[in-house]
Image: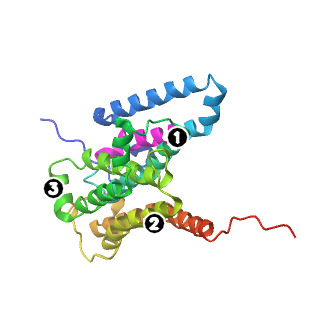
């Protein structure tokens, strides 16, 4: 009779990054990275292509892909039931770091026929209210105890929830950073306001985790947590991780709003000569 391998409750970073391939994530990621690399190489053949697709964009996209692979293809992805804080750290990388890197990697001047089917679909997906509704549904529903408990019990939390965080956050960051201006007519002010609204669900959930007196999720009530943390400490640390991860996007929203106000009041006008 084979005995199960005991879980190391004090893993190092090297332990967490041991490869653990997940085909459902790995194949689409490699296909997307391969297509991007092919188009980038083709663009380097012309001066116009090099101008609209500089190397720094490819570097950011590549960094996003590396972080995506590290987050989804490592042993850390298999420890969902042992550390809520580790799980939330992975989700925040997928929601707040990987998407802006991927979006910033999109080249300038992508030509999309505004009357074509692709433009209509993108116009719907990148509509601020649609993106906000999808993002809020993912953040709120899957962090309500009933929803999260069900996802852990049915083993969908390990793969489904990271995918939902990644895809919904890609919509949010695409609205904020506006990589396709011909199908995204939103101005700086509306993008800043959208960023503030999009930050509210995360901040609300993080606050609940920080100040809740008891463990909210049944699978973690009596769990053996990594690094000698109690279940309640694990939950509170998850709240800090989510709140701190959302601060850069919140800061960007304030910057966009401030820039919009400056433009609205004529603050960028050149002073007349004396």
Q: Which residue is mark 1?
A: 105
Q: Is residue 205 left or right of residue 4?
A: right
- x and y, in percent, of residue 201 in the image: 34, 66
Query: Can see residue 10?
Result: no
- Outermost residue toward the left? 1
Labels 3 and 2: the sequence-earlier one: 3
Image point 33% across, 34% down: which residue?
21
Image point 44% across, 31% down: which residue?
33
Q: Residues within 10 Å of mark 1 (few under 14, many from 20)?
A: many
Which one is in front, 222 or 122? Answer: 122
Would residue 62 be counted in the magenta stretch? yes
Q: Secondary structure at mark 2?
A: helix
Mark 3 → mark 1, Cα distance in angstroms:
36 Å
Q: Secondary structure at mark 3?
A: helix
> Of helix, strand and loop, which mostly describes the magenta segment?
helix
- x and y, in percent, of residue 227 in the image: 36, 58
Mark 2 → mark 1, Cα distance in angstroms:
24 Å
**Chain part drawn in magenta:** 61-78
Image point 28% across, 48% down: which residue?
7
Q: Residues within 10 Å of mark 2 (few under 14, many from 20)?
A: some
Q: How is the image coloured?
A: rainbow
Q: Which residue is mark 3?
A: 150
Q: Residues within 10 Å of mark 3 (few under 14, many from 20)?
A: some
Image point 19% across, 41% down: which residue?
4
Q: Which residue is mark 2?
A: 193
Would residue 195 be counted in the magenta stretch? no
Judged by depth in the image, the label closer to the viewer, 3 or 2, is 2
Residues under numbered marks 2 and 1 in contact, where contact means CB atoms less than 8 Å apart:
no
């Amino acid at each position: 009779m084979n005995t199960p391998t005991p879980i190391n409750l004090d893993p190092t970073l090297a332990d967490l990054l041991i490869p653990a391939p997940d085909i459902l994530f790995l194949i689409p990621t490699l296909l997307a990275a391969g297509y991007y690399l092919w188009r980038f190489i083709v663009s380097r053949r012309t001066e116009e292509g090099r101008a609209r697709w500089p190397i720094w964009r490819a570097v950011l996209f590549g960094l996003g892909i590396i972080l995506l692979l590290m987050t989804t293809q490592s042993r850390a992805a298999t420890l969902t039931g042992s550390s809520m804080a580790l799980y939330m750290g992975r989700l925040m990388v997928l929601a707040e770091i990987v998407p802006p890197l991927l979006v910033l990697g999109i080249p300038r001047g992508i030509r999309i026929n505004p009357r074509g089917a692709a433009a209509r679909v993108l116009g719907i997906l990148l509509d601020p209210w649609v993106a906000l509704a999808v993002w809020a549904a993912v953040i709120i529903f899957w962090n309500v105890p009933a929803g999260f408990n069900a996802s852990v019990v049915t083993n969908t939390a390990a793969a489904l929830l990271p995918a939902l965080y990644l895809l919904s956050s890609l919509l949010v960051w695409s609205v904020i950073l506006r990589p396709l201006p011909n199908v995204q007519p939103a101005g700086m002010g509306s993008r800043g306001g959208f960023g503030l609204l999009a930050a509210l669900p995360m901040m609300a959930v993080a606050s609940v985790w920080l100040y809740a007196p008891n463990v909210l999720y049944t699978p973690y009530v009596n769990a053996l947590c990594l690094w000698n943390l109690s279940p309640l400490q694990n939950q509170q640390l998850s709240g800090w991780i989510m709140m701190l991860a959302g601060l850069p996007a919140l800061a960007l929203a304030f910057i966009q709003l401030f820039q919009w106000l400056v433009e609205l009041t004529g603050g960028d006008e050149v002073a007349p000569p004396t």
